[in-house]
Image (cartoon, helix red, strand yellow):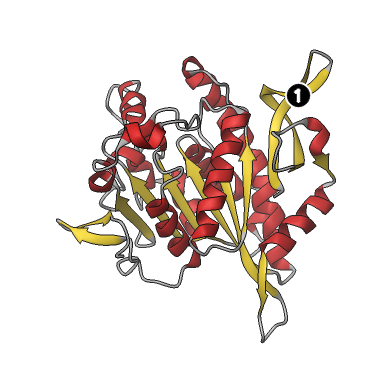
Amino acid sequence: MTDYVVCVRNKKTVAGEKVFGNEPGPTLFLRVPGDAYPRPSQAIARSAWVAEVLSQAATGVNGMTAKPTGDILVFIHGYNTSQETVLKRHRRLAADLRSVGYQGAVVSYDWPSAQSGLNYLEDRDDAKDTARRLRDDCISLFSSQQAAGCEINVHLLGHSTGAYVIRNAFTDADEKTSIKNRPWTVSQIALIGGDISSRSLSDADSKSKSLFRHCVRLTNYQNPYDSVLKLSDTKRIGLAPRVGRVGLPGDAPRKAVNVNCGPYFSGLDEHALTQGVDYYGSFDHSWHIGDITFATDLASTLAGDIDRHQIPTRRVLDGQLVLEPPAA
């Protein structure tokens, strides 16, 4: 199956072959064969790429308007992630979602993250810089389709620093008149292992006002055992606990939903689940890739048909929504 990727990495030549590097570069729209990994030679025209993605996303027709209906999920990866790992996670996520009933398209937004834990600050800078591309080449791109009457729902899934890319893309979007003055929304935004401060998602924080204004619902998947986010908070002297570890603030907007995955995660067998698998990195930060319970919850979230408290992979425990396996 073909994979669709928006790539904003630079190009370089290695052993006579054009490949992607780890610095920002021009936006390319890639059609990646199912047995390959991203290469500059896979770039196609933006118009052709959009048409193919929309065709894959369309799963029905609205009987009243005769417009196509469907879904596009844009996956934004985190820091310290190679292109091969991005595609492996993309493919695993797409396969799991399809196995539980999601029928739409899955697209990856590949920003220039170096495969090194020492590159955190540089990756963070690149993430901020390339958030503008997510705005211009995904948010603006698909919002223009909505303006034309297209009834394809666009969703975003941000992992780790991908949450930071999303938040900055929305902040920038409201500063661009051509987007700000056009009626558009993203349907569902989901964050997992989100490497942004919890308080930045409070109702009063200016950093996220545009984010909440332009989405139907935001779901934050929290894992209190996430050691990567503990390290991220330590770098900030403990002054900015990360939303993917501690959860949403108490004064988050009503359209924000927190799902505590800690009780579920604590019962997973890391050794058994990671045998022969090379796309996890830190398991407590990326456990959701390949997890069918998470995929089931995410698919229900993207469908948007069920109240947050009635999704079958959740229950209330001590006043919190927690993730749990669906009933047999």
From this viewpoint, which residue is outermost toward the left? 318
| Left or right relative to 104: residue 203 | left
* Up/down of 23 relative to 271, above or below: above
Left or right placement of residue 219 versus residue 67 in this view: left
Q: Is residue 124 placed above or below 242 in the rendered structure? A: above
Q: Position of residue 120 (x, y in %)?
A: 48, 21
User: With respect to residue 195, does 20 lie above or below?
Assistant: above
Nearest the viewer among 61 and 161 is 61
For the point 36% across and 48% down, the residue is: 221
What kind of residue is marked 1?
A: Val
Secondary structure of residue under mark 1: strand
Q: Is residue 214 visible to the viewer in this orientation of the structure?
A: no
Q: Quadrant of residue 51?
A: bottom right
Residue at 71% in and 33% down = 38
Tell which residue pokes out farthest to the bottom in this image. 64
Residue found 51% across the figure and 58% down from its top: 99
**Few, some or many C-alpha atoms within 10 Å of disc 1 (few <14, some 14-19, many ≥20)?**
some
Q: Nearer the viewer, residue 299 or 148?
A: 299
- The quadrant of the picture occupied by the C terminus is bottom left
Give percent across and percent down for residue 175.
61, 47
Of the pair 33 and 199, the residue shown nearer to us? 33
Q: Position of residue 163 (x, y in %)?
A: 48, 41
Q: Is residue 139 visible?
A: yes
Q: Position of residue 18 (x, y in %)?
A: 81, 23
Q: Which residue is mark 1?
A: 19
- Please give the count of numbered marks on the rendered protein: 1
